[in-house]
Amino acid sequence: MSAKATIYTLPSCVQCDSTKRLMTREHIEYDEVDLSVDEKAMEFVRSLGYSAAPVVVAGDKHWSGFKLDQIMELAS
């Protein structure tokens, strides 16, 4: 089964850690991409209009930051 979401993260990012922890708790499958080592991923995130991590992409939805409501919507 493929991942339901991709989380673009940075090291030492509290919001990134919170997002991953909640998605794990809610059994949402995800892939993690470290923006500090993946230049193409950084370009992609910027092309979506974001400059802060985490950026979550799930299907045609995407957002930046720790968004409880968005994560819970994915879980339902």
Image (tube, helix red, strand yellow):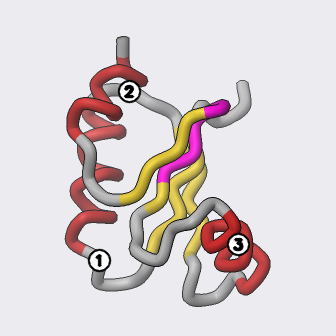
Residue type, label 2:
His
* Quarter where residue 25 is shown: top left
First in sequence: mark 1 vs mark 2: 1
Element type at mark 3: helix
Q: CA distance from mark 1 to mark 3?
A: 17 Å
Location of mark 1 (residue): 13
Picture coordinates of residue 29, whole percent (x, y): 52, 34
- Three-letter residue code for mark 1: Cys
- Mark 3, residue position: 41
Pointer 1 local density, CA inside 10 Å: few below 14, some 14–19, many at least 20: few
Q: x, y (%) of residue 49?
A: 57, 66
Name the front one of labels 3 and 2: 3
Residue under pointer 2:
27
Q: Which residues are magenta?
A: 56-60
Using a 10 Å C-alpha cutoff, classify the residue at mark 3 as few (fewer than 14 neighbours), some (14 to 19) or many (20 or more). Answer: some
Q: Nearer the viewer, residue 49 or 31?
A: 49
